[in-house]
Amino acid sequence: MKPTVSISDNERVVLDVVRRNEPVVRSAIAHQTPFTQPGVHRILESLVAQHLVTVGQAKANGPGKPSPELHLNRSRYFSLGIEVSTSAIDVCLVNTACEPTSQTRLVEPVSRRDPALAAVHQVALEMLAEQGRSAADLIGIGLGISGFFVNGTVNAPEPLEDWSLINLHDALARHFDAATWVTNSATTAAIGESLLGVGRTTDNFAYLAFNYGFGGGVIVNGRPHFGVNGNAMEISGLYTEDELPNRPALQYLIAELERHGRPIKSIEQLQEDFDPTWPGVESWVERTLPQLNLALRAILSTLDPDVIVLGGEIPEALADIFIERASLRGSSELRYGVAMPVPELVYSQAARIGPALGAATLPLKATIYP
């Protein structure tokens, strides 16, 4: 299935300049691109004809004739994001500005794939109807799901066996008449971060997703890198069986808190209520830090990113502890008194956008943005 919208690479560049700077006058665009002013005019005419850009009032921009103001067309096309976790399915509809217009969470049925997708389909139609649009106006559907990929199929954790080792594109096609993209949840989060978070200031960063499990994604030169099988930054693969229970997966923090008399029913409750002074937090952090440091040094040594983002569902106060206490330096990096540069560790700038928004930006990144 082809996407509803498909534009040229040059059109993508100009559209992204409009997105990053809107409202922007037409005369201010050329110097942010490799194109001439007449070339930018032709590209913009095409984007307007394709209902991706709207033209507003003319505004003065220095000497000369006033130039028209340009905006993204937020009412014509949309993208749907579906984020499947072990406890819920999050659904998000976004416009071409990557802004969510509707979001919801379904908790039943999650483990049964086809009933779950039927429920998502009904919710999606209702979301589109609220915008005065139909399924024909979807640029595409992005689905994020935890797990690693084998021959194009995901091997997801329990209780998502019904989603595992089958062609999820075919499963989506039984319910949606739209182009589809499927990747792991950490990569969808990294794509969301590239459009709405630290990606606004850097094109090269690694993303660590602290969820029930622990994964990652990577953006290289502004584009997601998936790897041959779709498993790039499947960071938990670093660990041996003995090390896995000490990796920074939030399931183990919840178990530690329960052992200290503070039961937490869900990751969502952990996010909302987290207090770094709770008994059990310090012991878990101490036990986990060596495995986090291993992941950080592996990222530094192989990817050399500008920034490493701590994201996923980690509470900000917990991310701050890791940022303060983590170590990216090994024991033998000092040479002639000079150490290898290390990336900055930051908390996600897009952490509050909802888990499905990253999935919804996947079709946008694949079809209309560079």
Image (cartoon, rainbow, N blue to C red):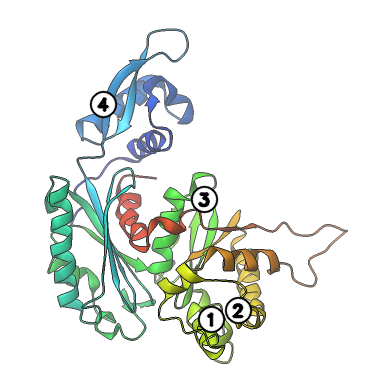
**Distance between the Cα atoms at labels 4 and 1?**
54 Å
Residue 17: x and y in percent read: 41, 35
Q: Which residue is mark 1?
A: 253
Mark earlier in primary sequence (1, 3) = 3
* The disc label shown at residue 189, or none: none
**Distance between the Cα atoms at labels 1 and 2?**
7 Å
Kindly indicate whether the residue at mark 2 contacts the one at mark 1 (C-beta within 8 angstroms): yes
Residue 114: x and y in percent read: 16, 76
Q: Which residue is mark 2?
A: 281
Q: Residue visible at 35% across and 80% down?
A: 156
Q: Quadrant of residue 304?
A: bottom right
**Distance between the Cα atoms at labels 1 and 3?**
27 Å
Q: Amino acid at mark 3?
A: Val
Q: Nearer the viewer, residue 265 or 146?
A: 265
Q: Amino acid at mark 1?
A: Leu
Q: Amino acid at mark 2?
A: Val
